[in-house]
Image (tube, rainbow, N blue to C red):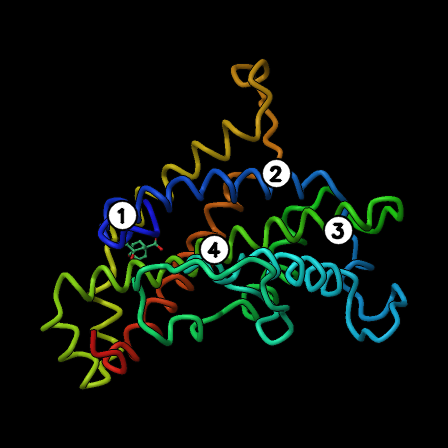
Amino acid sequence: MDFMKPETVLDLNNIRQALVRMEDTIVFNLIERSQFYLSPLVYKSNYVRIPDFDGSFLQWTLLQQERIHSQVRRYEAPDEEPFNPTKLLPSLLPPVNYPKILANYSKEVNVNEEIYQFYVENIVPKISCKEGDQLENLGSVAVSDIECLQSISRRIHFGKFVAEAKFQLDKQLYTKLIKEKDIESIEKSITNSAVEQKILERLVDKSRSYGTDPLMRYSQNPQSKVDPEIIVKLYKEFIIPVTKKVEVEYLLRRLEDTQ
Ligand SMILES: O=C(O)C(=O)C[C@]1(C(=O)O)C=C[C@@H](O)C=C1
């Protein structure tokens, strides 16, 4: 997929291949995070005193990283959404002239707040190796969390490309459903249960093999670093439904853009 060539980005097969590739990144990032303790101090407001900042150590670290990355154009890319969209810095590099792929309002479709909250409250407690903090690892935990958050965010916001591709494939149907604000039928029409099922099956294999020492894989009790069930559940109950939410949110506004 090449963002300078819209036809490659709006090909549903290419999009699905990219989503499959992102599974690897997400599974690896979760495995990395699983070696650390729960680390509540990373998420506690103002535990680390930082001048002129009100929030948690993770929020501060994420903001600093996004500010630097905004200076190298990260969030100008159509497949990257920031967690701090109002606090970024201007790019030091000249803008890239991406051809138009998504609708003009696409950067306004941003569900990162929901992803952040769900990650901290529901994912970290399930994957971390132990309760409590290891004070020497607070920085490593925050850095690892950022990798997890950004890979999950990129995957979920890819829903915009899926939605645009589906809109282009059946403009007549979607125009009708959008005009009628028929959310239920839009949801139904973007759902492909067979694709979802395949994702969940593949994730069992991936989390088993990526999370197991290859020499131990064939022993009686191979120990997975992250329980495959947790990753499957995460996709089933959060990542896929929120990707669909992004698709619906994007589609509901699609007639604002006449192209
Ligand atoms: O591949 C698609 O058609 C998508 O819409 C993406 C996705 C997903 O999140 O992976 C979401 C909804 C579909 O039911 C299947 C898969």
| Residue at the disc numbered 1 | 195
Quarter of the N terminus within the rendering: top left
Q: Is mark 1 on a helix, strand or loop?
A: helix
Label 4 C-beta lies within 8 Å of the nearest ligand 1 atom:
no
Horizontally, is 94 left or right of 62 in the view? left
Mark 2 and mark 1: span between their CA atoms?
24 Å
For marks 2 and 3 on the same chain, the one whose residue lies earlier in the sequence: 2
The residue sitting at 14% across, 61% down in the picture is 169
Q: Which mark is drawn over residue 154? A: 4
Mark 4 and mark 2: span between their CA atoms?
18 Å
Q: Which mark is drawn over residue 14? A: none
Circle 1 or circle 4, nearest the eye: 4
Of residue 85 and residue 176, the one placed in the foreground of this image is: 85
Instruction: Find out whether the residues at labels 1 and 3 contact each other: C-beta distance under 8 Å.
Output: no
Horizontally, is 160 left or right of 180 in the view? right
Quarter of the C terminus within the rendering: bottom left
Of residue 58 and residue 71, the one placed in the foreground of this image is: 71
Disc 2 marks which amino acid?
Answer: Ile
Disc 3 marks which amino acid?
Answer: Leu
Label 1 C-beta lies within 8 Å of the nearest ligand 1 atom:
yes
Q: Which mark is drawn over residue 31? A: 2
Label 3 C-beta lies within 8 Å of the nearest ligand 1 atom:
no
For marks 4 and 2 on the same chain, the one whose residue lies earlier in the sequence: 2
Pointer 4: residues within 10 angstroms few (<14), some, or many (20+)? some
